[in-house]
């Protein structure tokens, strides 16, 4: 069975580890209950991170006494055991509220779900899997992974600590002996720690032989690994590097970006530095690249890095934000991505081609040509009477059956060419706007229209099937011929037009605006 709840403790010195732990836990145990004992700053910090982990988080900020201290500081001051006793406090509280709890140290990374709890037992423990000398020093069992369903056992644990040879950990052996009939042990595939392996004397072949990947799960000695009790560093040692390779090979991009969120203390987005050395990759830094900077302005834990070593946009380390309208810009870098998010392309078309060469893809958000200008104008925008029924900005030759004179009767305002700000002024006065594309693809104009509540009229080349929550005749009108448009518009009352206008603005604000598009993006990656 699965645990009824999880529990952990943390102070601000280790809050970045906690974020990685909570994100990976939420990936594999969505909506699980977790009880967290922490300090005030950690509670504030958790309220500000993006995204909010999809967990039922119960926070108790009572550890302010320990806020400024590291583990080393507490041991030096002789209060490490006092701090560890708070672990028992949160476990007892979790058992009282939820019936049982799996305590995990906050520096864990969860890579598969815990399904191996034996509910008939009362205590679950995890061996350290170290040699006899090390067992004599630190104990046979780890205090960083303990499941329990009986408060009396926790009380006994507390009572034994004064007799322990190694803080709160070594006396778990005594608990196991006392409650032997009510104890189960987690397998070697759980609680993988560097402590098990001596990096300086590592037999790499023997070490690697224990790890096998099957169906994107990492097995260790025959069992699927549930959690890595490992603190990954910017400069990784051989064990950390090997585990990271295994995560890449098993396509665990969600866990990888969560780990690097902890390492970098922020989500890091790389944007190619312009101008690039290759003319093919020159870009005006508008569209998504402009939106990315706005995302970082609206989210404290998102940072932009202009990078001269790439031609593409990335979420660190290897999720590709592919913002080009076709695959013509795909180079060797793309092959190194763990996930490709397709903003300007379509998962069913270009995505299929990328999947055929072994890459993982997802549909993504889209954006206006100049999102900064749109949002600046939205700040001062006030709804006024719309005196333009149908607006079209662009070359009339792009219209289907463009020689059909009915177009000129339907389109009440046609502008061939205008600067962006001037175009927006006309957009704000319009009820409907025509969106066309010379080739099959998504329309930046469509996003600009929707931002100001103008209902898009789209032709056959304009793709909308990748936009989550967008509905025909609610957010847009689709037509192939002018006579079809005439008929459809005649059936849309003023009241219906206003409803559609509100729906367009609401969709834009929820899916495209920089205040929401980052959350849409990161949630697509982690929880899709």
Image (cartoon, helix red, strand yellow):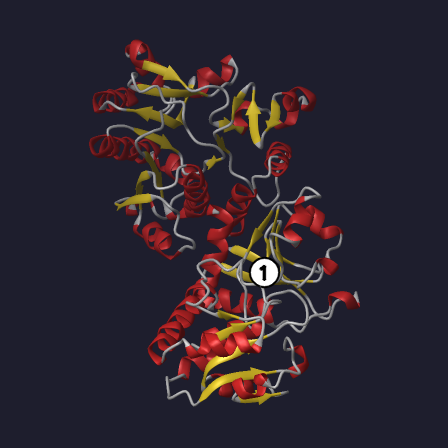
Residue at 25% x, 34% y is 94
Image side of residue 492 versus residue 251, left or right: left
Residue 320 or residue 302, whichever sits in front? 320
Indicate the quadrant where residue 144 lies. Answer: top left
Q: Secondary structure at mark 1?
A: loop
Could you tell me which residue is drawn at 50 percent across and 74 percent down? 456
> Mark 1 Cα within 10 Å, few/some/many (few <14, many 20+)?
many
* Front-lying residue, 429 or 96: 429
Point out residue 505 in the picture as x, y percentages from the top left corner: 41, 72
Which residue is most to the right?
Answer: 278
On screen, residue 449 above or below 173: below
Q: Is residue 374 at all visible to an observer of this figure?
A: no
Quarter of the image where the N terminus is located: top left
Q: Nearer the viewer, residue 37 or 1?
A: 1
The answer to whether residue 150 of the structure is visible from this angle is: yes
Q: Position of residue 283 (x, y in %)?
A: 69, 70
Residue in the image at 56% along x and 54% along y: 363
> Residue 264 vs residue 492: left or right?
right
Position of residue 54 measured from the top left corner of the image (x, y, whole percent): 38, 46
Q: Percent x, y for residue 187?
A: 46, 19
Q: Tally the marks.
A: 1
Quadrant position of residue 435:
bottom right
The residue labelled by disc 1 is 343
Looking at the image, residue 356 sits to the left or right of residue 16; the answer is: right
In this rendered view, identify the residue nearer to me: 506 or 123: 506
Compared with residue 121, is residue 60 higher up or lower down, i.e. above or below?
below
From the viewer's perspective, is residue 83 above or below residue 20?
Answer: above
């Amino acid at each position: 069975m699965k645990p009824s709840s999880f529990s952990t403790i943390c102070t601000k010195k280790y809050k970045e580890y906690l974020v990685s732990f909570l994100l990976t836990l939420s990936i594999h145990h969505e909506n699980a209950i977790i009880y967290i004992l922490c300090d005030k700053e950690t509670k504030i910090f958790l309220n500000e991170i993006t995204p909010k982990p999809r967990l039922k988080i119960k926070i108790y900020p009572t550890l302010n006494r320990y806020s400024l201290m590291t583990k080393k500081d507490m041991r030096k001051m002789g209060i490490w055991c006092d701090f560890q006793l708070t672990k028992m406090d949160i476990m007892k509280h979790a058992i009282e509220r939820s019936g049982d709890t799996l305590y995990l140290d906050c520096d864990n990374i969860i890579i598969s779900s815990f399904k191996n709890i034996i509910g008939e037992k009362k205590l679950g423990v995890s061996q350290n899997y170290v040699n006899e000398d090390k067992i004599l020093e630190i104990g046979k069992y780890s205090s960083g992974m303990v499941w329990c369903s009986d408060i009396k056992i926790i009380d006994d644990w507390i009572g034994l600590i004064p007799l322990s040879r190694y803080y709160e950990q070594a006396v778990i052996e005594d608990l196991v002996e006392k409650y032997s009939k009510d104890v189960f042990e987690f397998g070697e595939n759980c609680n993988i720690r560097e402590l098990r392996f001596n990096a300086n004397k590592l037999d790499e072949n023997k070490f690697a032989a224990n790890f096998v990947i099957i169906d994107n799960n990492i097995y260790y000695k025959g069992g699927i690994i549930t959690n890595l009790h490992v603190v990954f560093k910017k400069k990784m040692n051989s064990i950390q590097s090997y585990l990271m390779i295994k995560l890449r090979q098993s396509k665990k991009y969600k866990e990888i970006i969560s780990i690097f969120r902890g390492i970098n203390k922020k989500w890091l987005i790389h944007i190619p530095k312009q101008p690039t050395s290759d003319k093919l990759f020159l870009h005006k830094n508008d569209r998504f690249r402009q939106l990315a900077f706005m995302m970082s302005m609206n989210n404290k834990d998102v940072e932009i890095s202009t990078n001269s070593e790439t031609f593409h946009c990335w979420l660190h380390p290897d999720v590709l934000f592919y913002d080009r309208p076709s695959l013509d810009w795909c180079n060797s870098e793309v092959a190194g991505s763990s996930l490709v998010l397709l903003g300007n392309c379509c998962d069913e078309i270009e995505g299929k081609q990328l999947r055929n060469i072994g890459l993982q893809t997802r549909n993504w958000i889209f954006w206006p040509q100049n999102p900064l200008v749109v949002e600046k104008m939205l700040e001062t925008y006030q709804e006024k009477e719309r005196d333009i029924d149908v607006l079209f900005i662009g070359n009339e030759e792009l219209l289907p059956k463009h020689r059909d004179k009915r177009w000129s009767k339907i389109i009440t305002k046609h502008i061939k060419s205008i600067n962006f700000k001037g175009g927006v002024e006309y957009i704000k006065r319009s009820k409907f706007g025509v969106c066309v594309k010379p080739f099959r693809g998504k329309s930046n104009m469509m996003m600009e229209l929707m931002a100001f509540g103008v209902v898009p009229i789209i032709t056959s080349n304009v793709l909308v099937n990748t936009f989550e929550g967008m509905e025909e005749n609610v957010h847009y009108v689709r037509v192939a011929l002018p006579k079809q448009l005439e008929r459809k518009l005649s059936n849309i009352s003023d009241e219906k037009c206003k409803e559609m206008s509100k729906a367009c603005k609401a969709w834009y604000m929820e899916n495209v605006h920089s205040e929401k598009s980052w959350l849409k993006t990161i949630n697509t990656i982690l929880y899709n």
